[in-house]
Image (cartoon, helix red, strand yellow):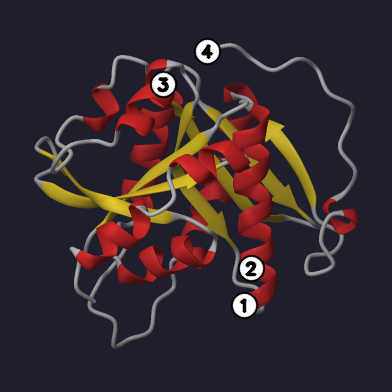
Amino acid sequence: MTWPRRKQPRRPVADESSGVTAVRLRRVNRWLLEGLRQDLADLYVASCETDPGEEYRSPSREDFLNRLTDDVRRPGFAMVIAETDGLVGCVFGLPVPGDGFWWLGFDGELPCSIEQLTRSDRVFAITNILVRPYPQVQGQDLARLLQERLLTDHQASLGTTLVEQADLPALQSFRSWGWQDIGEIWRPNGHTMFRVLVLPLGERTVATLEGLARHAWTRWPG
């Protein structure tokens, strides 16, 4: 993975969106993350609150910390956090290797455009976005800012993420943040079926992938 050239310091998020004020975004490395683990777990619990009637239940706090530990150990791991007077959001993930292993278990034929972006190391996988409950519009703004910051920092042309098929609240959230559903993928080690979501960046990538989401949704009722 080639890291981007050093950029000028970014202005506070308040300058970028009128929907979120006084929020600071900053990158966190593996060493700084160790001191934030419990705060991140608190944020995870707060962001996963569900209505009593919802069938899907998110993994536990301990499961989240275990998954975070696994991700941190992977090559290229990166995290961006959002702060006011405390932690209000974070996003983390890792670059998708050019060997295509990330797409193993994809149901059907992976689009050629995505294969090409993968081989050129222009795909970045977001493994989690967490936002402390805000009014709806502000929460969407913050999630969008976090994902944009992480992906642009890594000069990605395409973001990707996997969401458990039963996790309808998460799927709806990602769709509201601009992600497109392109199909299913099977992860045999976890015996779980996931929806594959992508977020094209830049006019050229958006045009190349146009229509993939509509095709995928016609194959997935609900």
The residue to which callout 3 is attached is: 73
For marks 3 and 4, give the CA distance. 15 Å
Give whichever of discs 3 and 4 has the lower sequence position.
Answer: 4
| Identity of the residue furthest to the top in this view | 2
Q: Are marks 2 and 1 in contact (CB under 8 Å)?
A: yes
198 or 64, nearer to the observer: 198
Mark in front: 3 vs 2 = 2
In what quadrant of the picture does the C terminus appear?
bottom left
> Which element carries disc 1, helix, strand or loop?
helix
Give whichever of discs 3 and 2 has the lower sequence position.
Answer: 3
Image position, residue 10 (x, y; %) = 86, 37
As shown in the figure, which amino acid type bears the numbered disc 3?
Arg
For marks 3 and 2, give the CA distance. 29 Å
For marks 1 and 3, give the CA distance. 33 Å
> Which element carries disc 2, helix, strand or loop?
helix
Image position, residue 178 (x, y; %) = 53, 58
Q: Are marks 3 and 4 in contact (CB under 8 Å)?
A: no
Position of 145 relative to 35 (above/below): below
Which picture quadrant has residue 203? top right
As shown in the figure, which amino acid type bears the numbered disc 4?
Met
Which residue is rendered at x = 9% and y = 45% of the image?
Answer: 191
The residue to which callout 4 is attached is: 1
Numbered circle sitting on residue 139: 2
160 or 126, nearer to the observer: 160
